[in-house]
Image (tube, grey):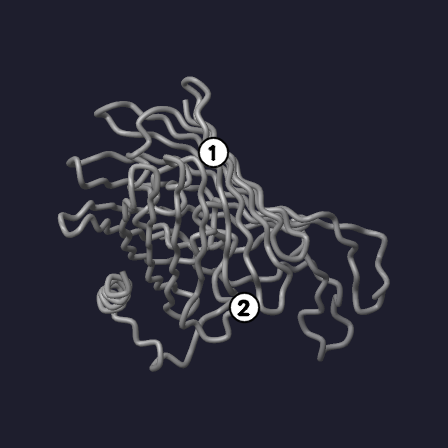
Amino acid sequence: MRRLIRLLLIVVMTMTGLSLQAQEVTKVGTTAAKFLSIPVGARALAMGGAYTALANDASAIYWNPGGLAQVSNREVFFMHSEWLADINFDHFALALGSGNMGTFGLSITAMTIGEMEVTTEDQPEGTGEFFDASSFAFGLTFSRRITEDFMIGANVKYVLEKIWSSSASGIGVDIGTIFNTPFYGVRFGTAISNFGTKMKMSGDNLLVRKDIDPGTTGNNDDVNAILETDKFDLPLNLRIGLSRDFNLNEQNRFTLAVDALYPNDNQQSLNVGAEYAAFNEMIFLRGGYRALFQDDSQEEFVLGAGLKYKFGTLGVSLDYAFQSWALLENVHQYSLVLNF
């Protein structure tokens, strides 16, 4: 097993050309809609986000649209996360299997915060006004099996970010594949996420009063003006993953997974994770680590558990994940999957 883990790490790092020690300059904080990088689903998060080659439920819309083809009937996915700084992060997904035609999906991602009081340099205690901020993504997905062992899918989403009376919007595309290789039961997955348009903030909050020529007296020093903002890319990310199941016996399974990540706004890194399934896929224990080899990463280990049970034709899965952060508050994420 140790040899397999080392082999997986070497293969993934080689394929993505990771040069971690040579990279000195990062682009942290240079993209819009960063909420699109927050992991979706307690199962995937509990495995350290190493889910590109594993994605086989409705959360595949986020991780790897190609994996959605493994949902052959109807599935509803709900997720809630108590994210950092009292931020609420929620995700809903619906997958509809259509036989040989493929699987269709739709999803809604929402990041919201409560109202905050407006403060200024002149009024640091507050102006009496309040503002809020939110981010949303609405996606449509299609996935299909090309062969029994090869799946491909795509997700198109509309992205919207709002703060007070200003907003920015854009279109993003995700494309992914999963291949069940003939080599020792290894699965190989690839996904590129958030390829799309740039986003630019606009709105009433950018209206200001401006003296266009402060060096001249007698002119109008109170002209209406609009602040010009820059355009920012979406958080583009290339993920390549490998996973393998180890069937210990008829009642127990152990799975290892590793993902290599190549984002446009940070350094390359690795996610690693494992899952132990007991009592014929009823009880699950999971663990993982995110952002390995990434300089100054605040993310630490992730742990989680799950329970799956079938009531007639209705399958119910409950999952929980706990993520430890070095200097920030720990994160709790909960998921519910209904399959019918």
How many C-alpha atoms fall within 10 Å of the one at disc 1: few (<14), some, or many (≥20)?
Answer: some
From the viewer's side, name the closer residue of 27 and 280: 280
Quadrant containing the N terminus is bottom left
Q: Which one is in front in this view, the residue at disc 2 or the one at disc 1?
A: 1
Cα–Cα gap, marks 2 and 1? 30 Å
Q: Residue at x 52, y 65 (%)?
A: 299
Judge from the rendering whether residue 38 lies leftward or rightward of residue 99; answer left or right: right
Residue 238 image position (x, y, % from top left):
33, 58
Q: Which residue is mark 2?
A: 298
Q: Which mark is residue 163?
A: none
Three-letter code, disc 2: Gln
Q: Residue furthest top?
A: 312
Q: Residue at x 80, y 69 (%)?
A: 121
Q: Residue at x 64, y 61 (%)?
A: 329
From the viewer's side, name the closer residue of 136 and 144: 144
Judge from the rendering whether residue 200 lies leftward or rightward of residue 293; answer left or right: right
Residue 22 image position (x, y, % from top left):
33, 82
Q: Residue at x 86, y 63 (%)?
A: 125
Residue 77 image position (x, y, % from top left):
47, 34
Quarter assignment of residue 144:
top left
Measured along the vertical axis of the image, is residue 228 above or below residue 33?
Answer: below
Quadrant containing the C terminus is top left
From the viewer's side, name the closer residue of 265 and 229: 265
| Circle 2/circle 1 CB separation < 8 Å | no
Q: Which residue is mark 1?
A: 317
Q: Earlier in the sequence, mark 2 or mark 1?
A: 2
